[in-house]
Amino acid sequence: MRSDRPPNQKGRLQRLSGWTLLGAFLLLAPTQDALAQLAKGENGLGVAMKGLVPTGKFRGTSEFGVGFAVVNGFRISEEFSVGADFSFYSAFGKGQSESLQFMGGQLGGYYHGGPVFVGVDAGYFFGKDIQNEFDVLLAVGYQAEKLDITLHYNFLGEVNWVGLRLGYYLAVFGQGQK
């Protein structure tokens, strides 16, 4: 959504949160041990369909949305994994003659308890219809074999939603190969 209002406290909080998460990721991710674990672990490359239900201010402009994504997952250990996701979305409804379209990239970390996982993603979303914005997404999901079902909720930016991702890993590499 476009906004002509000056930056406010929420905008400062977004930027501060974004830089904090990015800094933590850059400091912790490239450690030699983490890279060695990634090389030994199970890595997957896949595709996903997404559905979203707008919340907050976004709810005033759209009723629902769909999208698709390319996903990549790296299992560091039995309990921990990291992932990346690049998505394209279209949101419809509320009398729009055209859909609201935007893209986004996400990086996240996840804790697994068997096939169920919880995690946090840091995402950056952009497009002609929305301001470029950083956001944080909370995730809970289920992963079995090559199937990934994830529920996301993003809450910091102007464009908020609850989303469902149905993913399928086309290729799985590494020791845990299925």
Image: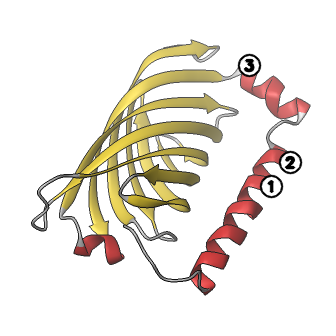
- The residue where tag 2 is placed is 27
Q: Of the residues under marks 3 and 2, which one precedes in the sequence?
A: 2
Q: Is residue 119 visible?
A: no
Q: Is residue 51 left or right of residue 20?
A: left
Is residue 100 positioned above or below 148 on the image?
Answer: below
Label 2 crowd bin: few (<14), some (14–19), many (20+), radius 10 Å: few
Amino acid type, residue under disc 3 in the picture: Lys
The image quadrant that residue 6 belongs to is bottom right
What is the spatial separation of the Cα atoms under label 2 and label 1, in whole angstroms?
A: 6 Å
- CB-based contact (under 8 Å), mark 2 and mark 1: yes
Q: Is residue 34 visible?
A: yes
Disc 2 element: helix
Is residue 140 positioned above or below 63 on the image?
Answer: above
Label 3 crowd bin: few (<14), some (14–19), many (20+), radius 10 Å: some
Residue 110 pos. (x, y %): 59, 47
Q: Is residue 41 left or right of residue 71?
A: right
Q: How is the image coloured?
A: secondary structure
